[in-house]
Amino acid sequence: MAVEVTLLNRLIGQLDTSPKRMSETNTRPDVPDEREAVLVDNRGMLCAQGILRLMRALVVLPPGQLVRVLSTDSAAEHDYPALCRNTGHVFVRHEREDGVIVSYVRKRAG
């Protein structure tokens, strides 16, 4: 249990949760706005590790928060949408940037 708390605290310290001004956020919910997204960097991790890291990040974030996940494991293209279907979070979309899979997930309300 102490190890889990330590890992969670380390993860929380890595998240960029600085408040954003309304004028800096996107008004179209169907189009992810990177300026409002919290970054979870899963590059170099296998699918199970990436899923766990994303789940830990989602625990501490407020409802509706957008998360931008960077992955190099091709399984992410299937795993993140499946995670969202099973947990109620909203899978927004995938993009590819220089061989990196960029996924957007929005934390479920309440």
Image: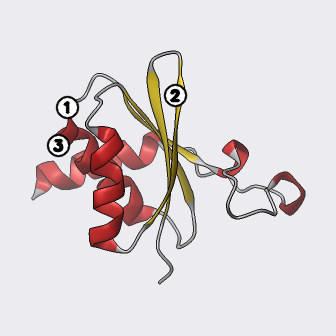
Where is 21 relative to 49, above or below?
below
What secondary structure is found at the residue carrying circle 2?
strand
Label 3 and label 2: CA atoms lie apart by 20 Å
Neighbor class of circle 3 (other Cα within 10 Å; few <14, some 14-19, many 20+) is: few
Q: In the image, what residue occupies the spot 82% across and 63% down?
A: 27
Mark 1 and 3 residues: CB-CB less than 8 Å, in contact? yes
Left or right, residue 102 beside residue 28:
left
Q: Amino acid at mark 2?
A: Arg
The percent position of residue 12, horizontal first and vertical second, equals: 41, 49
- Say the numbered circle drawn on residue 96: 2
Q: Amino acid at mark 3?
A: Ala
- Say the numbered circle drawn on residue 46: 1
Mark 1 and 2 residues: CB-CB less than 8 Å, in contact? no
Q: In the image, what residue occupies the spot 48% across and 63% down?
A: 61
Task: Work out whether residue 32 or residue 39 is closer to the camera in this orientation and state it.
Answer: 32
**Quadrant including the N terminus:** bottom left
Q: Is residue 53 visible?
A: no
Neighbor class of circle 2 (other Cα within 10 Å; few <14, some 14-19, many 20+) is: few
Q: In the image, what residue occupies the spot 53% across and 69% down?
A: 62
Q: In the image, what residue occupies the spot 66% across and 51% down?
A: 32
The percent position of residue 44, horizontal first and vertical second, equals: 29, 22
The percent position of residue 75, horizontal first and vertical second, equals: 25, 37
Q: Which residue is mark 3?
A: 48
What secondary structure is found at the residue carrying circle 3?
helix
Mark 3 and 2 residues: CB-CB less than 8 Å, in contact? no
Label 1 and label 2: CA atoms lie apart by 17 Å
Sequence order check, earlier mark of 3 and 2: 3
Sequence order check, earlier mark of 1 and 2: 1
Which mark's residue is nearer the viewer, 3 or 2? 2
What secondary structure is found at the residue carrying circle 1?
loop
- Asked which quadrant contains residue 87, the reply is bottom left
The percent position of residue 65, horizontal first and vertical second, equals: 57, 63
